[in-house]
Image (cartoon, rainbow, N blue to C red):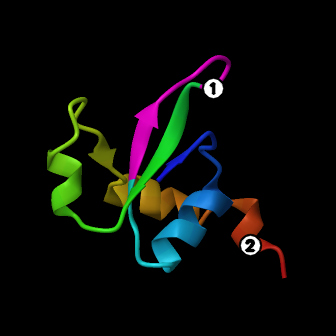
Amino acid sequence: MLRNSASTAVRVALLSAGFFVAQGIGTEPKIETTIAFSERESVTRQPLAPQLLDDKWLAARGRSPIFTKR
């Protein structure tokens, strides 16, 4: 699944739904996009070798205002 969004909310929703989420190549004017895979092995079969979101990204998610408002 390709999404023309790199927003934290979209990525967290996909992760929560059980997808493996990676950074996609940007499209004007976006710097990056989001790619979601239903199987981890699918990531390695992609020609441009997308990178799954790492611990650094997951830690930053906790600092996002979208999750701290309550």
- From the viewer's perspective, is 60 left or right of 42? right
Q: Nearer the viewer, residue 68 or 51?
A: 51
Residue ID at (29%, 39%): 50
State which mark lies toward you, 1 or 2: 1
Q: The residue under label 2 is which amino acid type?
A: Thr
Residue 12, position in %: x, y? 56, 67
Q: In the rendered image of this protein, does residue 23 appear above or below residue 64?
A: above
Q: Which quadrant, please, contains the C terminus?
A: bottom right
Give the residue type that dot 1 points to: Lys
Q: Residue at x 25, y 67 (%)?
A: 39
Farthest residue toward the bottom? 70
Query: Magenta residues, as a range?
Result: 22-30
Q: What numbered label is drawn on residue 30?
A: 1
**For this view, does 67 lie left or right of residue 41?**
right
Q: Secondary structure at mark 2?
A: helix
| Residue at the disc numbered 2 | 68
Front residue of 67/52: it is: 52
Check the image and name the residue furthest to the right: 70
Gap between marks 1 and 2 measured at Cα: 25 Å
Residue at 34% x, 60% y is 55
Q: How many marks?
A: 2
Residue 40's x, y, as percent?
A: 22, 64
Indicate whether residue 33 is drawn in magenta. no
Q: Is residue 36 above or below residue 4?
A: below
Q: Position of residue 7 (x, y in %)?
A: 65, 50
Categorize mark 2 by other alpha carbons within 10 Å: few (<14), some (14-19), many (20+): few
* Corner quadrant of residue 19: bottom left
Q: Is residue 54 left or right of residue 45?
A: right
Q: For numbered disc 1, what is the local secondary structure? A: loop
* CB contact under 8 Å: marks 1 and 2: no
**Among numbered discs 1 and 2, the one appearing first in the sequence:** 1
